[in-house]
Image: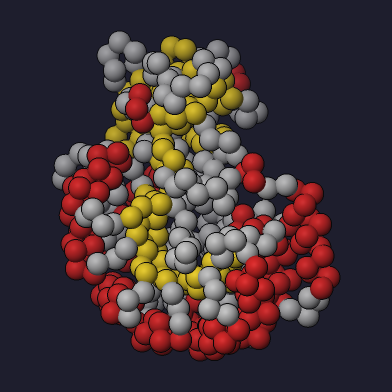
């Protein structure tokens, strides 16, 4: 059971209406790539990573591969017990893993409600285990499930919350840790690695896939957004001890539980200056939509070490369809990257990976132009947390050519830009 890839293509899996997951030995697993279904290569498959979850997808029929014709087939009836109904199944992978194929399914109705905001990866069953079409994109262990001890987390969180009853930021992170199980918040209370610093209750984009705020009647957001702006003093009180004592310390503004941190640039600028008067240790990072170049310039001058720019597409049209920006343009995003590089600071792309779109030839060339133009340093290979069918409707684009595949896409980027680094997390920039 130690092999990294299966000896043959796994069987299709499905769920009945009670959510019980079963294999169907009559068909093999299929992978989705922007509406196209095909059998994944065996080299695309790894065992389901520890800490991943399996989801039954309501109102979605699974698609499998006929073992003889190799063609995709829609399965609209439970092959074993027709009266029990049938649903597609997908994997939501543990951090540091990136999908090569989306789950293969078709909605039973065009009016089906969008699926919750998770990433849906193709999964099958073979030789007593589940397999997914994916790869480990970062060796960093900072969010590996095996690294978290629930009892220790609870004890240390409650101790710190009691020690800082008036620090609203620390109290907010306690909820992130104990209620939502946020890995970054957990690491903060464990005193290690990257700690989150949410600051902004507002945003200047209306992202279709926003995980902290969704309109009524849409899919539910996965966590509550922060409802206050912490003071520079609250931020310093939380961040400085972490930077002083944590191994490979990073503090990151801009989290899933907030809006756009650049809207609080004055607060963050003051906080960075206060922090750097106390210590030069560690990395101060900003996760952002990079919408306000002047604010980015101010933060770089204050001592911001790195920025992670979120981007679903390197093409302005499709970027706008996802982000629905309010008062900024794609050119502002690129200018923010250029400003950080002029200050000789580190720039990552939080590049939302969506099989069939990200690895299309058109998107590859657009991304390559941005890399060549800006000299950015790093690409974080993050899965897009969104219903695949819904995302395809929002983007409303039909690639002119078939996608090259995620492994080939990565190989070509490495070949074209040998200085470019890849991973999943914000890197610690110190020694």
x, y (%) of residue 32? 35, 35
Q: Which of 87 and 9 is in front in this view?
A: 9
Q: Can residue 133 be seen?
A: yes
* Residue 106 relative to residue 22: left or right: left
Residue appearing at x 46%, y 21% in the figure:
3
* Residue 416 relative to residue 351: left or right: left
**Residue lying farthest front?**
431
Residue appearing at x 59%, y 61% in the figure:
247
Residue appearing at x 36%, y 68% in the figure:
347
x, y (%) of residue 320? 32, 66
Q: Which of 312 and 49 is in front in this view?
A: 49
How many numbered discs? 0
Q: Can residue 177 be seen?
A: no
The image shows residue 407, relative to residue 375, as above or below, that is above
x, y (%) of residue 100? 36, 38
Residue appearing at x 18%, y 52% in the figure:
416
x, y (%) of residue 186? 67, 57
Residue 371 placement: quadrant:
bottom left
Q: Which of 368 and 326 is in front in this view?
A: 368
Q: Tell me how the rendering is colored.
A: secondary structure
The image shows residue 76, relative to residue 80, as above or below, that is below
């Amino acid at each position: 059971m130690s092999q990294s890839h299966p000896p043959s293509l796994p069987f299709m899996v499905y769920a009945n209406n009670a959510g019980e997951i079963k294999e169907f030995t009559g068909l093999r697993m299929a992978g989705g790539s922007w509406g196209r279904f095909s059998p994944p290569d065996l080299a695309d498959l790894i065992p389901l990573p520890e800490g991943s979850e399996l989801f039954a997808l309501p109102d979605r029929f699974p698609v499998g591969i006929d073992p003889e014709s190799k063609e995709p087939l829609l399965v609209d009836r439970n092959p074993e017990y027709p009266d029990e109904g049938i649903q597609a199944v997908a994997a939501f992978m543990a951090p540091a893993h990136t999908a090569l194929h989306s789950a293969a399914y078709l909605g039973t109705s065009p009016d089906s409600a969008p699926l919750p905001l998770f990433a849906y990866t193709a999964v099958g069953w073979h030789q007593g285990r589940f397999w997914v079409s994916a790869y480990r994109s970062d060796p960093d262990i900072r969010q590996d499930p095996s690294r978290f001890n629930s009892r220790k987390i609870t004890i240390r969180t409650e101790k710190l919350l009691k020690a800082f009853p008036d620090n609203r930021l620390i109290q907010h992170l306690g909820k992130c840790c104990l209620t939502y199980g946020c890995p970054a918040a957990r690491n903060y209370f464990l005193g290690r690695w990257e700690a989150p610093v949410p600051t902004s209750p507002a945003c200047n984009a209306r992202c279709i896939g926003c995980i902290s705020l969704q309109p009524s009647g849409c899919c539910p957001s996965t966590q509550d957004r922060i409802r206050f702006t912490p003071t520079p003093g609250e931020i310093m009180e939380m961040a400085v001890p972490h930077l002083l004592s944590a191994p490979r310390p990073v503090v990151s503004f801009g989290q899933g539980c907030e809006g756009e941190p650049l809207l609080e640039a004055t607060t963050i600028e003051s906080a960075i200056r206060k922090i750097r008067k106390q210590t030069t240790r560690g990395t101060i990072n900003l996760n952002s939509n990079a919408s306000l170049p002047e604010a980015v310039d101010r933060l770089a001058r204050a001592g911001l070490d790195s920025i992670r720019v979120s981007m679903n597409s390197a093409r302005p049209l499709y970027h706008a369809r996802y982000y629905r920006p309010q008062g900024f343009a794609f050119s502002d995003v690129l200018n923010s990257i250029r400003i950080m590089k002029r200050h000789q600071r580190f720039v990552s792309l939080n590049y939302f990976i969506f099989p069939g779109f990200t690895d299309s030839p058109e998107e590859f060339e657009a991304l390559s132009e941005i890399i060549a133009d800006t000299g950015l340093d790093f690409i974080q290979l993050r899965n897009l947390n969104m219903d695949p069918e819904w995302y395809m409707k929002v983007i409303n684009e039909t690639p002119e050519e078939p996608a090259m595949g995620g492994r080939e896409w990565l190989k070509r980027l490495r070949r074209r830009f040998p200085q470019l680094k890849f991973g999943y997390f914000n890197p610690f920039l110190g020694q």
